[in-house]
Every structure is written in structure tokens, then in C-alpha cells.
């Protein structure tokens, strides 16, 4: 267990985080894979985003959605090299367009959101390795 201090909306919290073994990640990724076959097409993009959180492995950085909204434009592709601060996609929320930027230098491993897709807060939009 590792302890971290975080501040949310001006309130400080001390949290403990336990590292998850890779075996658990594989089991979590297998479970949602069956859902798109039984779900209607409209539910497929939401179900496709669920495994993305489980696919963020050691040495990789997930790029979460900072707020609920709709992806307007995706500007990068998987396999593309990016630098910290590069714009990955545009998220529209409350009629404002927000740039989602790369938090680290690296290569885009996956893009987990598409144009015109609605996203929830903290949903992993991309993974950078």
C-alpha cells in the first residue's frame, strides 16, 4: 500500500492505494468484452470505454476526461508520438470547447473515445506509453 495526499475542491484527503496485479486486469478486461455482442449498437461506445481503464498498465498514463461532455474532434491516432501539452482531442462541455492535452511525453497507445461520443468524468479517453 502506498499513501498519497490529495486535495479535492480545497479539501485535503490522505488516501491509500493498493497496486493491482496484472492477473486481475486481464479478468476485468474479459468481462466487458461480452457486453457489446448482447447490447444494442448505441451502448457499444460506452462499453468500449470500460476496458480502457483496465488497460492502463505500469509505465503507462491514462488521460481522463476532466468533466462530462461530448468529444468534438480527435486530433491524434494510436501509435503517434506526442509531447507533454500536445492537444489530443477537443471536449465540448457547457457550450465551451476544452482542449484535452497529453500529460506526459510518449506514444499514444490507444484512443478510447470517438468524435460525437459522450463521456463521463474520469473516463479514460486515451492511454500514453
Image (cartoon, rainbow, N blue to C red):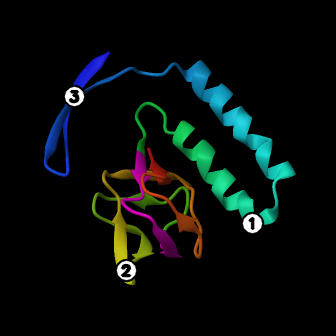
Horizontal side of 50 relative to 98 (left or right) equals right
The mark nearer the N terminus, 2 or 3, is 3
Viewer-side residue, 45 vs 8: 8
The mark nearer the N terminus, 3 or 1, is 3
Question: Which residue position is annotated with label 3?
Answer: 4
- Circle 2 — which element? strand
Locate residue 72, reporting x and y percent. Answer: 50, 78
Q: Residue at x 80, y 64 (%)?
A: 41
Q: Could one spot residue 55 in this view of the protein?
A: no
The mark nearer the N terminus, 2 or 1, is 1
Q: Quadrant of residue 85?
A: bottom left
Locate residue 55, reporting x and y percent. Answer: 56, 39
Q: Quadrant of residue 111?
A: bottom right
Q: Given this view, does label 2 or label 1 mark the residue nearer the observer?
A: 1
Is 25 inside the magenta-drawn segment? Answer: no
Q: Residue at x 58, y 74 (%)?
A: 115
Horizontal side of 35 relative to 10 (left or right) equals right
Distance of label 2 from label 1 (alpha carbons): 24 Å
Q: Quadrant of the C terminus?
A: top left
Task: Please tell me whether residue 20 is drawn above or below residue 67 in the rendered image.
Answer: above
Q: Could one spot residue 70 in this view of the protein?
A: yes
Q: Residue at x 73, y 58 (%)?
A: 44
- Circle 1 — which element? helix
Q: Residue furthest top?
A: 1
Locate residue 47, reporting x and y percent. Answer: 68, 52
> Which residues, given as a range, are shown in magenta?
62-75
Q: Quadrant of the N terminus?
A: top left
Residue 42, disc = 1
Distance of label 3 from label 1 (alpha carbons): 38 Å
- Callout 3: 10 Å neighbours few (<14), some, many (20+)? few
Amino acid at each position: 500500500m502506498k499513501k498519497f495526499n490529495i486535495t479535492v475542491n480545497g479539501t485535503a484527503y490522505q488516501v491509500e492505494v493498493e497496486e493491482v496485479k496484472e492477473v486481475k486486469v486481464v479478468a476485468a478486461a474479459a468481462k466487458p468484452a461480452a457486453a457489446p455482442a448482447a447490447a444494442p449498437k448505441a451502448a457499444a461506445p460506452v462499453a468500449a470505454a470500460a476496458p480502457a481503464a483496465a488497460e492502463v498498465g505500469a509505465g503507462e498514463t491514462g488521460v481522463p476526461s476532466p468533466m462530462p461532455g461530448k468529444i468534438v474532434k480527435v486530433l491524434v491516432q494510436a501509435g503517434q508520438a506526442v509531447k507533454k501539452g500536445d492537444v489530443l482531442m477537443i471536449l465540448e462541455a457547457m457550450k465551451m470547447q476544452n482542449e484535452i492535452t497529453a500529460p506526459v511525453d510518449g506514444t499514444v497507445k490507444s484512443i478510447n473515445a470517438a468524435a460525437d461520443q459522450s463521456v463521463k468524468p474520469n473516463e479514460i479517453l486515451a492511454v500514453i506509453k
